Image (tube, rainbow, N blue to C red):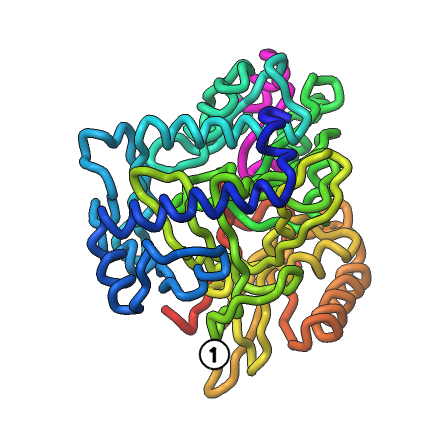
Amino acid sequence: MFNKEYESMEVKKLKELQLERLRWSLKHAYNNVAHYKNAFDKARFNPDKFSSLDDLKHVPFLMKQTMRDSYPYGLFAVPLEKVIRIHSSSGTTGNATVAGYTRNDIEVWAELIARSIVGAGGSEKDIVQDAYGYGLFTGGLGLHYGAEKLGATVIPVSAGNTERQLMLIKDFGTTILVCTPSYAVNMADYAEKKMPDYDFKKTKLKAGIFGAEPWTQSMRKEIENRMGIDAYDIYGLSEVMGPGVSCECSQKSGLHIFEDHFYVEVIDPETGEVLPEGEQGEIVYTSLTKEACPVIRYRSRDITRIYRDSCKCGRTMIKMEKVTGRSDDMLIIRGVNVFPMQIEAVLMEVEGTEPHYQIIVDRKGALDDVEIKVEVNEKIFTDQLGVLKGITERIEQRIRSVLGISAKITLVEPSTLQRSEGKAKRVIDKRNL
């Protein structure tokens, strides 16, 4: 562990620490951010009377649209001269969400990334190749500062230029790769097709820490088998902090949430009701130590569940399952709720398919139509038509039986679907165009 005092803290003491820090965070937000003062007053919630963690359910939620409406600095709780860095989302669907960081915020963030790297087996002896995008996106600089905090060597290559990425892994002796899972698959594809003599197992690469998009256990196995590494999930949101809100440990049995800095709840996404521990729903975050941009009950839209177990790694902090999808990414197909991650899980079960797919939803008259384009490996695509037909029928049958919808399956040649050096775009919903 990087910080054993906190990561293995007795749960009772951890709850006491959360209550103490939550009192500070609520007062800090109320006293310094107009939105929170207005929202708390409207809900008749007085931070001075906050006495138990259960009282948080009386606090209004923070929605992403509120963050957009507050662009750029409306949710900052400190003067700009105390903000030493700003990150933001892309703002492709409206105003960007903006996050500011004080010097202490950056220090906390770096420590949580350092904890995450250690959880994935890293140490100050490692060479970390950072292939997340640098800039306003939180991934690149977030992992960079955390690796430096740990004392590891950082290769700040950023995303893109895949051939160079592969050469640096080999030439610089990279031991840990950090990027999106879809870009890791892209690297493996590139090596197989354009660098046939490249062998990951002859490099020093031992682990990958992948995040910024949901990914399945099947994709984990795909990456691990093709790259010969251990693949770990890291999670975060730019609105809450960035990567490092939670991360897997050596057990790969859920992501430990760093509860000394974040209080989490899971709610019913329809009613907003807080659900018991262990039930699946939308995860909600409240920051406990953020100075520049406190977030109070931020609705992430990410679907998961939280639970506490006796993890063999010794960490006592609550876990979250790998995110299965987002409530705002949910597709309603002829009355059936479907998440893209559910479709990916089905596709990855069928032998001969590649982890590259695209879901196209359209409406013909009053009915929804779904087409799923999925790449098959080169050997199968050049095989007899009967083989391709069999794969198509198996996918169609699995989609019907597992998800309860009918879909047109289109098998396409390898490397024909657009690749991404960052987050993969899986869904084209023409009903919204």
Q: Is residue 364 magenta?
A: no
Q: Residue 383 location in percent, x, y?
A: 79, 52
Q: Nearer the viewer, residue 70 or 5?
A: 5
- Judge from the rendering whether residue 199 lies leftward or rightward of residue 174; answer left or right: right
Task: Using the image, determine if residue 19 lies above or below residue 94.
Answer: above
Whether residue 393 can be seen here: yes
Q: Position of residue 416 (x, y in %)?
A: 57, 48
Work out which quarter of the rendered image holds the C terminus and state it.
Answer: bottom left
| 189 vs 143, nearest the viewer | 143
- Is 132 displayed left or right of 304 in the figure? left
* Residue stretch in magenta: 165-186
**Can you give x and y, in whole percent of width and height, for residue 168 in the image?**
56, 17
Query: Image point 74% across, 41% down: which residue?
Result: 311
Lateral position of residue 428 relative to residue 26, left or right:
right
Residue sitting at the far bottom: 366
Give the residue drawn at x 59%, y 70%: 338
Q: Tell me the residue that label 1 is attached to.
A: 363
Quadrant containing the N terminus is: top right
83 relative to 319, above or below = above
